[in-house]
Image (tube, coloured by chain):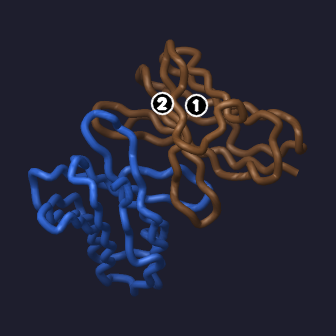
Chain colours: A brown, B blue
Amino acid sequence: GAVVSQHPSWVICKSGTSVKIECRSLDFQATTMFWYRQFPKQSLMLMATSNEGSKATYEQGVEKDKFLINHASLTLSTLTVTSAHPEDSSFYICSVPLRTEAFFGQGTRLTVV
Amino acid sequence: QQQVKQSPQSLIVQKGGISIINCAYENTAFDYFPWYQQFPGKGPALLIAIRPDVSEKKEGRFTISFNKSAKQFSLHIMDSQPGDSATYFCAASWGRSEKLVFGKGTKLTVNP
């Protein structure tokens, strides 16, 4: 399957700071990438669709000013959690579609203290 | 309309047994039904997927059964092994959106 690399794997940050998470498609180009959020022992919830060359599309209830998405190139999307608070602590996962399948990154564990 | 309901929430099976996880959906526009396996601290990995034009798909020990009229699909893991212990998610998507709607997950434990 396709390889999707997410960085960092885990990060701890202080409340009020911003954190950037990268999602890279290593062996194919993608005009679209997806960002999910997963709370402990819960399912994945789609946050937004990252679109290369245009604005991201956010799901209902997701604050676009808090979760900034930039699809910098056909192989890179970044999610920046701005002014992070403890309630933003979660597991963030990106996925990249290839044909009809979705390939996921290994996830980023964000802990805000 | 967008929900995918998954059961059971947790499942304990003995080594060599059959694990069965069920999912149901409402949105008849869904046309792609994948199953993902997730280990703690890792992203989900695609296990097997099916489209509505077939009623069953088998890959090794993993089989998806699909009932279009009942809007249900299930994952069967034959000869379950301790290494299969993980959380399994069913999902669904429609058209070419590639946006996945996930079930709530089933934590499978296979005892040696």
On the image, numbered disc 1 is attached to which residue? Answer: A23
Dot label at residue B48: none
Mark 2–mark 1 CB contact (< 8 Å): yes
Measured from the top left, where is residue B93 in percent x and y? 31, 46
Which residue shows up at 28% across the image and 67% down it?
Answer: B75
On the image, numbered disc 2 is attached to which residue? Answer: A33
Chain assignment, label 1 = A
Which residue shows up at 73% across the image and 36% down it?
Answer: A81
N-terminal of the two: label 2 or label 1?
1
**Depth check, front residue: A79 or A96:** A79
In the displayed structure image, the side of residue B6 where residue B62 appears, left or right: left
For residue A88, say whether it is visible: yes
Depth check, mark 2 against mark 1: the one in front is 2
The crowd level at tag 1 (other Cα within 10 Å; few <14, some 14-19, many 20+) is many
Chain assignment, label 2 = A
Query: In this picture, is B34 found above or below B22?
Result: above
SS of the residue under disc 1? strand
**Depth check, front residue: A111 or B68:** B68
Q: CA distance from mark 2 to mark 1?
A: 9 Å
Which residue shows up at 39% across the image and 40% down it?
Answer: B99
In the displayed structure image, the side of residue A30 where residue A70 appears, left or right: right
Which residue shows up at 61% across the image and 22% down it?
Answer: A70
The amino acid at mark 1 is Cys
SS of the residue under disc 2? strand
Picture quadrant where residue A69 is located: top right
Picture quadrant where residue B36 is located: bottom left
